[in-house]
Image (spheres, coloured by chain):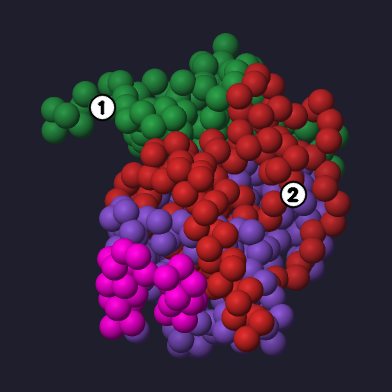
Chain colours: A green, B red, C purple
């Protein structure tokens, strides 16, 4: 139980929080697609903690674990000329260190 | 192809990171997975997270993202998978490039011999 | 089959075996599916590389032929029919559907699904929402329930376009989505793998689970088509 509480405290974002994705393009293995960098989205759900792929890719342990979120973006936020319906969305799995609280 | 994309060794947008681009109509035709393609996946799985854990998915992805735009675009999915598996295994010291090349030549000559029989 | 593989492994232990005999052994033993093709098709580069990698790993003790065989059998058990059974159960049994939506791994273990470390996440298509799945960065796919991804899913066209123009892409698959329906694209590129529960078509009332499973196609579980009663 105590462990569960501690884990919950470490998590930075909750469902419904507005976040923005870091707008940076460093070298290296990254799982955050280009098209969502710098964009604004909403935490759809907290998915749990996973090893960090950016470290695993180079043979490191992948620890410390990173919180993974599903972030929901409005299509209109991502593309200038989205032709579909207003409510259309994309959900992307994004690790916590790529996210900032949106102000 | 362009200066739009880079390899994972450089800053910028990876050539694998193509969401939002236009590559034309989707060909809905499907093909059977060939036995060697399945074998390649099986080897990767048994050396990876579901098996011996010597390599992992992200190492393979990184190898694909570093192999160069030209190579990435000239190989199909299973070829890329096999090439990236080779890269990670050589990196891990499981065998050398030379050993692999020698063995490929050996197997190739046997196929040729079978053919001529 | 198992005997043959053991024999194969055994032969590798004998050093000094003649190179040609060695490779012939290889071809005969393991990849006999190619026998019919050999006369016309020299194996291509990556096919050769795969055989060579296998031989080297086995010889050096990094992997046994038995492990490879088991991995191949596991791969064979990963078929869209498995996903179809899961979807049919969800259509048939509302409680099961709730379990699936809550925790995919837990619910799919009823069908013997072992997704490794992946978090199986189930998306339900409804009157108001249509879900479609892609991996723009590589081709992540829920292999343990759908098998290996089809050609189109791996194509650059699908990966690149479905995120920016999902409705047009769906049209190319013959799927028209009403304007009032929300289209949700899921870019599956980390530790989650997505399975879509398509909308149960009208005219399937009273169907058995098996009969329901027969109309659930692979493509409908990725979200590019809707199942239909033909």
Instruction: Provide the secondary structure element on which disc 1 rests.
Output: helix
- Quote the CA–CA distance across marks 2 and 1: 45 Å
Q: Is residue C17 magenta?
A: yes
- Majority secondary structure of magenta residues: helix
Using the image, determine if residue C226 lies above or below residue B99.
below
Residue B81 drawn at (x, y percent): 56, 52
The residue that label 2 is drawn on is B74
- Please tell me which residue is depicted at 78% across the width and 56% down the height of the picture: C169
Badge number at residue C186: none
Q: Secondary structure at mark 2?
A: helix
Residue A65 seen in render: no
Q: Is residue C143 depicted above or below A61 in this figure? A: below
Q: Is residue B49 magenta?
A: no
**What is the crowding at mark 1: few (fewer than 14 residues within 10 Å), some, or many (at least 20)?**
few
Q: Which mark is residue A7?
A: 1
Q: Nearer the viewer, residue A83 or B61?
A: B61
Q: Position of residue A60 (x, y in %)?
A: 36, 28
Q: What residue do we see at 82% from left, 48% from top?
A: B23
**Residue C159: x %, y % from top left:** 70, 48
**Magenta part of the chain:** C2-30
């Amino acid at each position: 139980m105590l462990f569960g509480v501690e884990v919950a405290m470490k998590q930075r974002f909750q469902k419904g929080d507005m976040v923005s994705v870091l707008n940076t393009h460093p070298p290296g293995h990254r799982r955050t697609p280009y098209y969502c960098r710098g964009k604004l989205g909403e935490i759809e759900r907290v998915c749990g903690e996973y090893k960090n792929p950016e470290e695993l890719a180079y043979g490191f342990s992948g620890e410390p674990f990173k919180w993974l979120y599903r972030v929901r973006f409005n299509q209109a936020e991502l593309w200038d000329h989205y032709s579909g319906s207003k409510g259309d969305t994309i959900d992307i799995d994004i690790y916590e260190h790529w996210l900032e609280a949106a102000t | 192809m362009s200066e739009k994309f880079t390899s994972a060794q450089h800053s910028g947008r990876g050539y694998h990171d193509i969401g939002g681009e236009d590559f034309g109509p989707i060909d809905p035709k499907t093909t059977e997975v060939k036995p060697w393609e399945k074998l390649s996946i099986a080897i990767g799985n048994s050396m990876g997270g579901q098996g011996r854990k010597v390599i992992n998915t992200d190492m393979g992805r990184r190898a694909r993202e570093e192999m160069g735009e030209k190579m990435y675009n000239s190989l199909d999915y299973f070829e890329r998978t096999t090439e990236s598996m080779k890269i990670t295994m050589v990196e891990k010291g499981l065998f050398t490039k030379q050993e692999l090349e020698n063995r490929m030549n050996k197997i190739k000559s046997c196929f040729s011999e079978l053919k001529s029989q | 089959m198992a005997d043959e593989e053991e024999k194969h492994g055994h032969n590798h232990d004998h050093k000094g075996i003649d190179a040609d005999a060695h490779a012939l052994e290889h071809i005969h033993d393991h990849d006999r599916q190619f026998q019919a093709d050999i006369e016309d098709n020299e194996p291509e580069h990556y096919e050769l590389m795969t055989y060579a990698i296998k031989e080297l790993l086995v010889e050096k003790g990094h992997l046994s032929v038995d492990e490879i065989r088991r991995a191949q059998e596991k791969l064979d058990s990963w078929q869209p029919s498995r996903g179809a059974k899961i979807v049919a159960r969800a259509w048939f049994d509302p409680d099961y559907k709730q379990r699936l939506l809550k925790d995919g791994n837990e619910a799919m273990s009823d069908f013997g699904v072992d997704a490794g470390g992946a978090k199986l996440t189930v998306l339900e298509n409804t009157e108001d929402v249509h879900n479609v799945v892609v991996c723009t960065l590589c081709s992540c796919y829920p292999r343990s329930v759908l098998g290996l991804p089809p050609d189109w899913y791996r194509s650059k066209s699908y990966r690149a376009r479905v995120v920016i123009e999902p409705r047009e892409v769906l049209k190319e698959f013959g799927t028209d989505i009403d304007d009032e329906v929300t289209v949700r694209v899921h870019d599956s590129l980390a530790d989650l793998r997505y399975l879509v529960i398509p909308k149960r078509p009208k005219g399937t009332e009273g169907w058995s689970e098996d009969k329901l499973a027969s109309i659930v196609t692979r493509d409908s579980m990725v979200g590019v088509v809707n199942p239909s009663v033909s």
